[in-house]
Image (cartoon, rainbow, N blue to C red):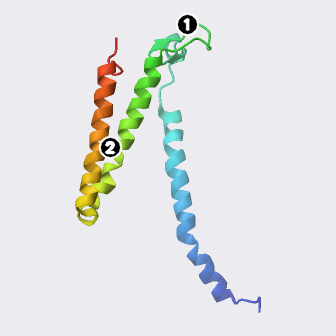
Amino acid sequence: MGYCSDQNHKMNLDQYLPVLLFILVGIGVGIAPQVLGYILGPNRPDAAKNSPYECGFEAFEDARMKFDVRYYLVAILFILFDLEIAFLFPWAVALKDVGVGGFWAAVVFLGILVVGFVYEWKKGALDWE
């Protein structure tokens, strides 16, 4: 029962050829640009390029120094509003299917989004001093 002919075995291996090619092309696309960049790219290091730089200012103190909360606030607000807008794409695609109830649910959702945006604006969370 466990015996298979060479023809069946060859046919089974042929089914995996596209998967193998896909893996090889993926590895090539991932590695080839890095190798080309390493080989062909210029290598002119200097002190400015090798210095640590992060969060809009040069590192001049201990790594445990306090960061300004505005960086985190702007990042959180961006993620919040970006995700809320991303929820509108499926709604827009299915607008005919969701009907009037779905339309008004989206209007309420956008209203809450606008109220939150105005609140953050009035609180000065979007001001960069």
Q: Judge left or right: residue 77 versus residue 95.
A: right
Q: Amino acid at mark 1?
A: Phe
Q: Position of residue 27 (x, y in %)?
A: 55, 52
Mark 1 highlights which residue?
60
Q: Which of pointers 1 and 2 lies earlier in the amino acid sequence?
A: 1
Which amino acid is tagged 2? Ile
Q: Which mark is residue 118?
A: none
Residue located 48% across and 34% down the image: 40
Residue 52 at x, y = what percent? Answer: 54, 16
Left/right of residue 87 with respect to residue 47 in the rendered view = left
Q: Cα distance, mark 1 to mark 2?
A: 38 Å
- Residue nearest the observer in this picture, 127 or 101: 101
Which residue is at a point 28% across and 46% down the rendered structure image? 108
As drawn, is 19 to the left or to the right of 106?
Answer: right
Looking at the image, is 120 positioned above or below residue 60?
below
* Residue in the image at 63% along x and 82% along y: 10
Quarter of the image for residue 111 reads top left
**Residue sitting at the far top:** 60
Residue, x 40% and y 36% (percent of image)?
80
Residue tagged 2: 85
